[in-house]
Amino acid sequence: MTTSSSSDRSVDTQWMTRALRLAEQGRGFVSPNPLVGCVILDRDGEVIGEGAHLRFGDPHAEANALASVQDQASLQGATAYVTLEPCTHHGKTPPCATALAQSGVARVVIALQDPNPHVSGGGAARLQSQGIEVELGVCRVEAEEQNRAFLHWIETGLPYVQLKWAQTLDGFSADHEGNSQWISGKESRRLVHQWRSEVDAVLVGSATVLADNPRLTVRHVEGRQPRRVILDSKGTLPPTSQVFQDEFSEKTIWVTAKSAQSAQSSAAAVDPMLELLTSHPFNGTRLTVEQDDQGHCSLRHVLRALAEHDITSVMVEAGPTLAASFLRENLVDQIDVFTAPILFGKGMKAVDPAVWGMHLVEEDGGRGRLPIRFVTTESFGQDILTTYRF
């Protein structure tokens, strides 16, 4: 690896920042691959090519950037800025390190080394073996932030979990009658739909499906429809629920506990007219996971199964009990809270204190505190969004 002067580093940062912006074009469409952007400059420092990885299975950023160069001779002695170490393996596309090495590029600047321990460093090594100068670590922190879900999935084998809720100024997520819709304003709701288009899956529990019969789709913005994960430990949700019957039902992942069959039999014995999804056509995916000590789906097993289905990020839009369960199991990576300028006086908390509060007291030696890291605060219309990470 080489070391740049401060002036060179400034130029490198400028163009790597451009490459990071290009990478964002693939957000919501390239998973389970990472976001990657590439900018190519000729010997005189002029941009001659750029590209991003835009769709899973389509050409990578480096290939798109090389293809965009009109005069291939201008690649001789050029510099390429890539936000992630070029790959060396044959997958759905040819190795990018090889393509760069054969192009005539003389220098490759890389923001982030490949996080896969089996191939990390291989791309840089291949480039160097071909006499190409390699600079590593330019805008590394920004590249890590951009691909934090992908990195988490690679490093832990679990999807990145974003827990979000809306609450009133006095901390309630539903009124005393349990009504929770439209606490937040239209600007906040639009942002949530944007998030849905960017994550791999949204997740709710059976209580939310029974109470709201939600669609959990992307509306109000353009983007990909996420997979919809429905935790239904007993397997007794109505088959007429929208998530099982609408035009996106093939994107629904119905998760039940291993004890669901006996629970279904018991429910049918009590109500012979009960309709079960198992006896109806269902175009989605069914997963059966281990149950916890209370007979509910083990959340860690759920996340592990989702990760095996190439789901790298999950937004939990759950009720207070399930939200508390995710926190109790230390499975939350990020919390996003919308606070609206409304007062309820009484109602339901976003996180069930009966599930979470006692656990926190027990785990914290009786103090009942868990510090988390504040990230940012933004306003959306009349609402305030605050983001925290663990």
Image (spheres, helix red, strand yellow):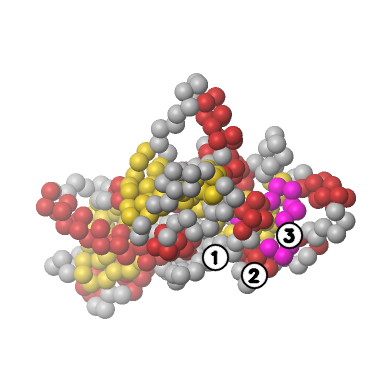
State how far apart marks 2 and 3 are (Cα). 13 Å
Q: Residue furthest left?
A: 7
What residue type is disc 2 on? Asp
Asked if the magenta segment contains residue 230, the reply would be yes
Asked which secondary structure carries label 1, the reply is loop
- The residue drawn where x is 63% and y is 72% is 247
Q: Which mark is residue 147?
A: none
Reading the image, the residue beneath label 1 is: 217
Q: Which residues are magenta?
A: 229-241
- The residue drawn where x is 53% and y is 62% is 226
Reading the image, the residue beneath label 3 is: 238
* Residue 86 picture location, percent across and down: 37, 57
Reading the image, the residue beneath label 2 is: 246
Badge 3 crowding class, 10 Å Cα cut-off, few under 14, some 14 to 19, many 20 or more, is some
Nearest the camera: 45 or 55?
55
Asked if the residue at tag 2 contacts the one at tag 1, i.e. Cβ–Cβ closer than 8 Å, the answer is yes
Report if residue 285 is visible in the image: yes
* Residue 48 picture location, percent across and down: 23, 72
Asked which secondary structure carries label 3, the reply is loop
